[in-house]
């Protein structure tokens, strides 16, 4: 009987989410508390990632049910619409580039940045975390601890992202971010980091919103622009927080 590998992948993705819930929720809760604290104190939140890790950055800003205060840090050289796309792999290995990106961003003291990097080994993400901390911002890393612990850093410090962040959340994925073995195929297939990273990021947003609400603070959440009144509500939200929103 032929194995249904697509179904197996879906089952495995579900197992990873269960593992995140069972092993990482304490740190997700800590991250949520810190996000809520930053919002309450009038500071700003940023999200950064390179290449496919940057998909989670796109997931977390300017969307229905999402935090209006999630500011993406994008660099065109590190995004998947650059051509040839192989440049992104070379660019994220350039030491000093991540430092420049953070220096040119609006990130300041007492802000918070979430950095997503699956391997956590490349200099751009490490430099971004180090420079953010130099600015006295709080750094949350979403990474793959199994993967990252098995590879060496490409940064001159010898450190990986999880070694320079203030708080680390493991995406609980496999080495190389591939999940499924098909009989007779040498390379494992099926990445899980986008599913995991998006789930972690949105769990932080949901829990942070609940914490803010418990303190009598309206969570800065977008409505859908495709429902009546959505555009008007979102415009008021953008106007209210214009001093802490940097993507408009």
Image (spheres, helix red, strand yellow):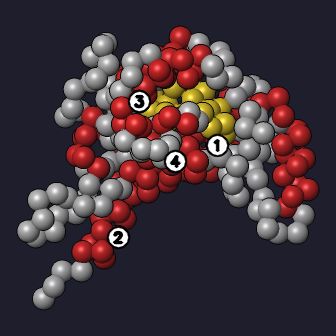
Q: Is residue 207 among the parts visible in the rendering?
A: no
Residue carrying label 3: 91
Q: Are marks 4 and 3 in contact (CB under 8 Å)?
A: no
Crowding near pointer 1: few (<14 within 10 Å), some, many (20+)?
Answer: many
Look at the numbered discs 2 and 1 and tell me whether their residues touch, using CB distance below 8 Å: no
Determine the secondary structure under disc 2. Answer: helix
State how far apart marks 3 and 2 are (Cα): 32 Å
Residue furthest to the bottom: 1
Disc 4 target residue? 81
Residue at 35% across, 63% down: 13
Q: Do the residues labelled 3 and 2 touch (CB within 8 Å)?
A: no
Closer to the chain start, of discs 2 and 4, is: 2
**189 left or right, relative to 90:** left
Q: How crowded is mark 4: few (under 14 residues within 10 Å), some or many (20 or more)?
A: few
Is residue 7 something one can see in this rendering?
Answer: yes
Q: Distance between the residues labelled 1 and 3?
A: 33 Å
Q: Say above or below: 152 vs 53.
A: above
Tag 1 or tag 4, which sits nearer the N-term? 4
**Label 3 SS:** helix
Density class for disc 2 (Cα within 10 Å; few <14, some 14-19, many ≥20) is: few
- The residue indicated by pointer 1 is 208
């Amino acid at each position: 009987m032929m194995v249904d590998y697509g179904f197996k992948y879906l089952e495995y993705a579900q197992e990873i989410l269960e593992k995140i819930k069972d092993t990482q929720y304490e740190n997700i809760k800590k991250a949520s508390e810190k996000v809520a604290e930053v919002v309450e104190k009038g500071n700003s939140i940023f999200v950064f990632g390179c290449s496919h890790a940057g998909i989670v950055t796109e997931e977390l800003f300017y969307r229905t049910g999402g935090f209006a205060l999630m500011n993406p840090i994008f660099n065109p050289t590190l995004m998947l619409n650059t051509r040839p796309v192989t440049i992104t792999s070379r660019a994220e290995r350039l030491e000093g580039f991540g430092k420049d990106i953070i220096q040119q961003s609006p990130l300041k003291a007492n802000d918070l940045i979430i950095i997503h990097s699956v391997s956590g080994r490349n200099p751009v993400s490490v430099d971004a975390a180090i420079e953010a901390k130099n600015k006295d911002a709080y750094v949350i890393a979403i990474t793959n601890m199994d993967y990252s612990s098995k590879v060496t850093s490409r940064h001159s410090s010898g450190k990986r992202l999880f070694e320079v962040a203030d708080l680390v959340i493991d995406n609980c994925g496999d080495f190389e971010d591939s999940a499924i073995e098909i009989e007779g195929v040498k390379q494992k297939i099926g990445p899980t980091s986008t599913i995991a990273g998006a789930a972690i990021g949105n769990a932080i947003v949901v829990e942070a919103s609940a914490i803010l609400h418990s303190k009598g603070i309206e969570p800065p959440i977008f409505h859908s622009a495709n429902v009546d009144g959505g555009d008007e509500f979102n415009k008021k939200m953008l106007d209210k927080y214009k001093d802490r929103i940097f993507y408009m």
